[in-house]
Image: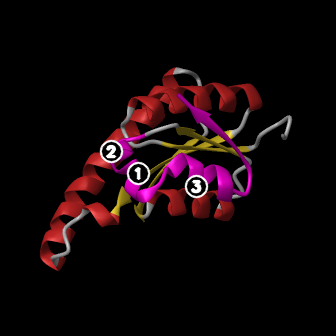
Amino acid sequence: MISHYKNILVAIDGSNHSEHAFDEAVKAAKRHGAKLSVISIINDNELSTSAFSFSKIYAAEKEQVEKELLKKVHDASLKNLENVEPFVELGNPKEKIVEFAKENESDMIYLGATGKGEIRLSRIGSTAAYVVNHAPCSVTVIR
């Protein structure tokens, strides 16, 4: 485990666990003087297969997610953390989190133990378990 983090990534999806993960990531970023990347993944498997519907649903979902991320940036600034960048990605959440961490040289990832997709956990597999097993850095899973 690294004693000083420079690039912390937190994945949020609106679940209670991801909200707690965000709070812990903000504290860690302040403690380490690190940049905090806040990412939210729009799961393309949950969107319509019609090209027209897909684009309309994706645009609406992206707008909502961007508003939530801007609120997170504001919340972090209220806690005196200014080096915060929001990111919205489209794809498989567990794969996108790992991919983003690799591409952006994250040295710590925070994420919730379960998210909005916990109902399908038995069919698809846990995002947290996948990230823990494939991430290029340390991962803190928050309950």
Residues shaded magenta:
115-143
Towards the viewer: 31 or 117: 117
Residue 130 got which mark?
Answer: 3
Q: Quadrant of residue 14?
A: top left
Towards the viewer: 66 or 127: 127
- Identified by mark 2, the residue type is Ile
Residue hosting label 1: 122
| Whole-number angstrom distance, CA of label 1 to CA of label 2 | 8 Å
Q: Nearer the viewer, mark 1 or mark 2?
A: 1
Q: Quarter holding the N terminus?
A: top right
- Identified by mark 3, the residue type is Tyr
The residue located at (65%, 49%) in the rendering is: 132
**Mark 1 and 3 residues: CB-CB less than 8 Å, in contact?**
no
Towards the viewer: 92 or 117: 117
Q: Residue furthest top?
A: 79
The residue located at (42%, 58%) in the rendering is: 124
Residue 81 can be seen, yes or no:
no
- Identified by mark 1, the residue type is Ser
Q: Residues within 10 Å of mark 1 (few under 14, many from 20)?
A: few
The stretch drawn in magenta includes residue 91: no
Residue hosting label 2: 119
